[in-house]
Amino acid sequence: MQKYDYFLAPEQLTSDTDLIIRNVGFSQCPPNYTYGWDTRDYYLIHYCLSGHGIYYAFDREYRIGPGDGFLILPGSTIKHLSDPRDPWNLCWVGFRGDRIPDYLQKAGLDQEHLIFRYTRDNLMESCIENIYDKARRPDVSSLTLTGYLYLLLGALADQTGEELDTPVALNHFEKAVRYIRHNIRSPITVEELADQHNVAPSQLYRSFMKHAGMSPKQYLDREKMDKACELIRKTDLSMHEIAGYLGYEYDTHFYKTFRRIMGMKPSEYAAEK
């Protein structure tokens, strides 16, 4: 594994307590490389340059690919895992400061929004690369280093502002689909979907039939089986582990649903991958 992680010396840290860079680095991870479950006393922003991986935080799982980034909060217990077939190439910057929560809020990041996507240009990589290169030069001011971090956070804030300026009203179907995908690991019911979006089950049913040509239950089962197929293809999890991951209390329920949706047993699908 190639990893370059530079921690700034005390004399390199700025006296401005609003924003202080702690460390910066790059890594090319091998397949299935796992890091965690540890905690830190500072913030970290990771940005994926290539490949794929998974970020686990606050009992949630996020699939990360090129152009995606993720925030690690101080004191949070996290883990991240590189893909077994297409391991990721990451860069990161660690920082702390009195104004960080305000800056992150402007960038659309907090405990409920740990993931961002930036594909406009190579600014994320460029800023982190400049911090890494210049931090090791004695003639470069700490203000220059924090300037690059301000630029990075500013780009995320600008992008978030653009997104917030053009809101899209989601209908009941779109809201329910988003909820299903964000909670794919939970044993969701149609009643729960309706309650979450303050709509009658019959109205939700009509919305799904109109937009997807199937009932909410059929759509939910399809989404879970699509995720099961992905886990079978991309991980070494057992069928029992996949069933538990997707919120099935009994393996037999998972097997019956998989066969009904996919037209074959999970083991038969696994044999074809």
Image: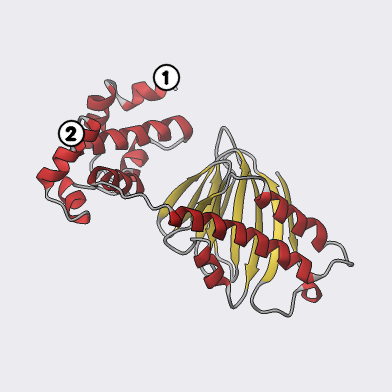
Mark 1 element type: helix
In the rendered image, residue 64, in percent from the top left (x then y), is placed at 52, 44
The answer to which quarter of the image holds residue 88 is top right
Residue matched to label 2? 209
Depth order, front residue of 131/58: 131
Q: Is residue 241 above or below residue 142?
A: above
Depth order, front residue of 218/166: 166
The answer to which quarter of the image holds residue 97 is bottom right
- Residue at 15% from the left image edge and 50% from the top image edge: 191
Residue 252 in view (yes/no)? no
- Residue at 58% from the left image edge and 34% from the top image edge: 86
Image quarter where the N terminus lies is top right
Residue matched to label 1? 272
Mark 1 surroundings within 10 Å by alpha-carbon count, few (fewer than 14), some (14 through 19), many (20 or more): few
> Which numbered disc flags the more N-terminal residue, 2 or 1?
2
In the rendered image, residue 210, in percent from the top left (x then y), is placed at 19, 34
Mark 2 surroundings within 10 Å by alpha-carbon count, few (fewer than 14), some (14 through 19), many (20 or more): some
- Label ID, residue 262: none
Left or right: where 37 falls relative to 244: right
Q: Nearer the viewer, mark 2 or mark 1?
A: 2
- Residue at 22% from the left image edge and 26% from the top image edge: 260
Image quarter where the C terminus lies is top left
Disc 1 marks which amino acid? Glu
Disc 2 marks which amino acid? Met
Mark 2 element type: helix
Depth order, front residue of 125/258: 125
